[in-house]
Amino acid sequence: QVQLEESGGGSVQAGGSRRLSCIALGSTARSWMGWFRQAPGKEREGVAAIDSEEAGRSRYTESVKGRFTISKDNTKKTLYLEMNDLRPDDAALYYCAAKPGICWIPSIVTSVYNYWGQGTQVSVSS
């Protein structure tokens, strides 16, 4: 069983930065992990994902490349999403997701993951 708890959401002006954190409890060793978001009236979309083997592999959706960075600290069992140059269309409920198992090629496909946090809201004002 895996429990995920996100934090770090809030309101920010366009162009600003925000760092999201996700603490993973339970059997999280060597897990697929990723960040997703869902804006009102839209489907949940993958934002970023990272490999389980600390090989430095990551994957990003096109709209956040160069602005967002995913990372993790295995000793703290924490996943991060550093978000820079935020835009109004980045506003959404951001979720952390996990799937136990070895991951060499990160995925931002929603259906891959079977554990989800409750989400943390990010608002961006123009």
Image (spheres, grey):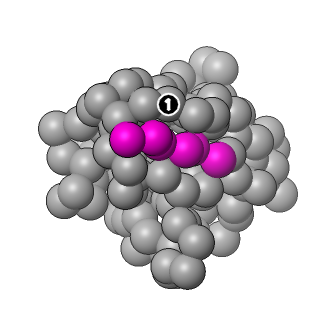
Answer with left or right where residue 81 lies relative to residue 61: right
Residue 96 location (% of width, % of height): 60, 51
Q: Secondary structure at mark 1?
A: strand
- Residue at 58% in and 72% down: 40
Bounds of the magenta span?
121-126
Residue 106 location (% of width, % of height): 34, 57
* Residue 69 seen from this side: no
Magenta stretch: dominant secondary structure: strand
Answer with the quarter of the image where residue 68 lies: top left
> Quick one: quadrant of the C terminus?
top left
- Residue at 64% in and 47% down: 121
Amino acid type indicated by mark 1: Val
- Residue at 55% in and 44% down: 123
Can residue 123 be found in the magenta stretch?
yes
> Quick one: quadrant of the N terminus?
bottom right
Which residue is the site of mark 1?
Answer: 12
Label 1 packing within 10 angstroms: few (<14), some (14-19), many (20+): some
Seen from the viewer's position, the closer of residues 119 and 33 is: 119
List the single residue furthest toward the top: 75
* Vertical order, 14 against 60 (above or below): above
* Residue 15 seen from this side: yes
Residue 105 location (% of width, % of height): 29, 58
Residue 88 location (% of width, % of height): 38, 50
